[in-house]
Amino acid sequence: MRHRVKTRKLSRTPAHRRALARNMVAALIEHERIETTLTKAKAMRPFAEKLVTLAKDKNLHNYRRALALLGNNKAAVAKLFDVLGPRFKERPGGYTRILKLEQPRLGDKAPRAYFEFVERTPKEIDLGLDD
């Protein structure tokens, strides 16, 4: 029975799941939109939301916590605190969205999705980076 079990194991060991989460959320922070499977996007959403909540209050303790969670990825943490934290300062939550794609992945027919931040800059949208 799965009663009150929140974690998705994704057929990986705990260390592999942690590495996957760090890499996917770092890519999300860097690009602000990634394409992945629907299950992975749903599993990574709480991790990304917690990091943005940390970045809303810029202090040394939160910065070090974010560094620890992202595995010492300084570029991603810098963008998180300098760009994304101020962008979502007034928003009480719900910083990410998952958009399902119609076509499944070619190799194994896994459902695909876009995993992105809700408030994207107009510059990205004008440049056609929505693809």
Image (tube, rainbow, N blue to C red):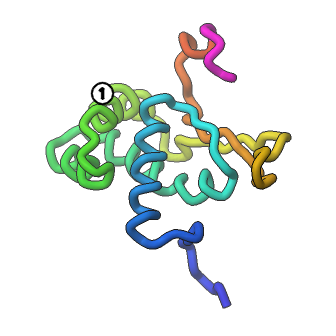
> In this rendering, would 64 be left or right of 127?
left
> In this rendering, would 68 be left or right of 40?
left
What's the residue at 65%, 85% (across, down)? 2
What's the residue at 29%, 38% (across, down)? 77
- Indicate the secondary structure of the residue bearing disc 1: helix
Label 1: how many Cα within 10 Å (few below 14, some 14–19, many 20+): some
Which quadrant holds residue 96?
Answer: top right
- What is the count of numbered marks? 1
What's the residue at 67%, 44% (across, down)? 98
Look at the image and tell me whether residue 125 can be seen. Answer: yes
Residue 59, x across and y down, in percent: 18, 41
Picture quarter with the N terminus: bottom right
What's the residue at 24%, 46% (across, down)? 72
The residue type indicated by label 1 comes to Asp
Picture quarter with the C terminus: top right
Position above or below: 29 against 123: below
Residue 45, x across and y down, in percent: 54, 52
Position above or below: 96 against 7: above
Q: Is 128 covered by the magenta stretch?
A: yes
Which quadrant holds residue 18?
Answer: bottom left
Which quadrant holds residue 43?
Answer: bottom right
In the orientation shown, which residue stands out farthest toward the front? 107
Residue 4, x across and y down, in percent: 59, 82
**Where does label 1 land, which residue?**
82
Look at the image and tell me whether residue 8 can be seen. Answer: no
Q: Nearer the viewer, residue 127 or 87?
A: 127
In the orientation shown, which residue stands out farthest toward the right? 102
Residue 123, x across and y down, in percent: 54, 10
Q: Which residues, given as a range, are shown in magenta? A: 126-131
In the orientation shown, which residue stands out farthest toward the left? 60
Q: Is 87 covered by the magenta stretch?
A: no
* Helix, strand or loop: magenta stretch: loop
